Amino acid sequence: MSDAPSSSVDAVRAQLERDAEGAGYHLNPDTRFVRDLVDGLLTNRRRYGYLACPCRLATGIADEDRDIVCPCDYRDADLLDWGSCYCGLYVSDEVRRGQRALAPAPERRPAKALRTPPQLLGSSRRLEGTVPVWRCRVCGYLCGRERPPAVCPICKATADRFEPFR
Amino acid sequence: MSDAPSSSVDAVRAQLERDAEGAGYHLNPDTRFVRDLVDGLLTNRRRYGYLACPCRLATGIADEDRDIVCPCDYRDADLLDWGSCYCGLYVSDEVRRGQRALAPAPERRPAKALRTPPQLLGSSRRLEGTVPVWRCRVCGYLCGRERPPAVCPICKATADRFEPFR
Amino acid sequence: MSDAPSSSVDAVRAQLERDAEGAGYHLNPDTRFVRDLVDGLLTNRRRYGYLACPCRLATGIADEDRDIVCPCDYRDADLLDWGSCYCGLYVSDEVRRGQRALAPAPERRPAKALRTPPQLLGSSRRLEGTVPVWRCRVCGYLCGRERPPAVCPICKATADRFEPFR
């Protein structure tokens, strides 16, 4: 059992929910489940100094764990493909509304040997031309992602209102 | 008279307002007027499956109606030019404050033969070089629009703080 | 002493705080200090018609004062370097949490002769290739700034989750 005081877990959960909803994301509606995950996040923060994913094994080396600091680099793709992130902390709108069952998302994180080495993350050459840019036709929001977000974080238009941009 | 329960209309209206205010947009301060429009939006959602503009004739073919799903592709330009969207659901800050009278916005949507065919919306070539990118000098927000937004959705700086970017 | 009614100062302060928090910024936790600055902002609005920085000398010529309308063009860089803006109205998360002392930020605004003339601000040539674009690896948010923001305004990921983009 964690030594995180309940108020802190609840405060962090509430902050995560505000941040999520403000940007068109959703926490899992199962509050008890979310509290356990937040408890794990806070345990990791005490242990490592950052909110490492509670469902993965962190190394404690910040550079190596950066992609699994919550929200992880894989959340958005998992939400689009599986309706939930690897942990089930974040879910898609369909899952939230009960129109799609919550199912486990497979691990999308590449094996260590296949990850981009931390020292290359700052290299602009690495990304040249690899990640497409999407434009919201309603408000003009631009983002660099493999696929458009489920909802525009600015105007809340749905993914089908995005178009490829340059 | 619509069969939308009042609570649903009010809930949707409140959500639209939160989304609008969070991004620097404003609903028409005439609450009764807005409720009627929201009622029309919900009627369209039941009829077509999406929130088609309540003031235009939808076809029921999602690909053909996409540009008039609320908020429509024309809202932002209408707000800048006329102080309100075609419906009057969204208004500019000046109209909201009563510094500018609410006046009907002319229909900006191109005639059907002049619209971009839905099958071309996914083509990146279509947009090459057509929509300029604007940058907020305060926070760096980038957006692809004909003109900068009235207010930066991130830091709330006004339109005159934007500059053309590349 | 200003003639701004207290309710107006408090209302503007509350609005600034909502805007700030929603985008990952923070007002100085010293409420009395912030109220004085807001009072100065409102005095400037009555005098000049815009919220000129209360800690700098405005000219009253909108084009020449644009970079010091609050939030000023220099806020974000000051927050990263000094933990607070020139006025101390906005502070970094570290300062807010008391993990870093509030210290005066030196004036970053260039001398008048070195500023970009207002008539060139609209020239896209001026910026060609000068300001880098950053991409949030979590949500894909793109921004044009010298350095990434302390927190992604969309998904609240920290600065170390940003990478150079093209």
Image: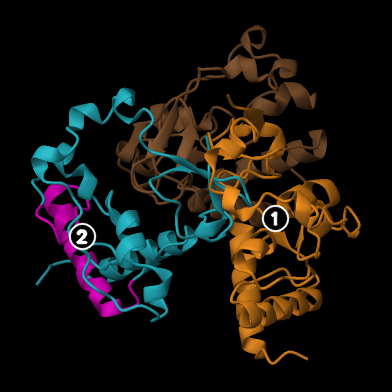
Chain colours: A cyan, B orange, C brown
Q: Position of residue A24 (x, y in %)?
A: 47, 61
Q: Position of residue A135 (x, y in %)?
A: 55, 45
Magenta span: helix, strand or loop, mainly?
A: helix
Q: Which residue is mark 1?
A: C6
The reply to whether residue B70 is in sight is: no
Q: Position of residue A94 (x, y in %)?
A: 41, 74
User: Which of the two residues, C143 or C53, is positioned nearer the viewer here?
Assistant: C143
User: Which of the two residues, B30 or C60, is positioned nearer the viewer here?
Assistant: B30
Residue A35 is inside the magenta segment = yes
Could you tell me which residue is drawn at 48 percent across and 35 percent down? C143
Position of residue B115 relative to residue A166, above or below, is: below
Horizontal arrangement in the rendering, residue B105 relative to residue B67 (left or right): right
Q: Which residues are magenta?
A: A28-57
Q: Which residue is mark 2?
A: A41
Horizontal arrangement in the rendering, residue B121 relative to residue A148 (left or right): right
Horizontal arrangement in the rendering, residue B50 relative to residue C44 (left or right): left
Which of the labelled discs sits on residue B48, or is there none?
A: none
User: Which of the two residues, B45 or A21, is positioned nearer the viewer here?
Assistant: B45
The residue mark sitting in front, 1 or 2, is 2
User: Which of the two residues, C100 or A32, is positioned nearer the viewer here?
Assistant: A32
Label 1 is placed on what type of residue? Ser
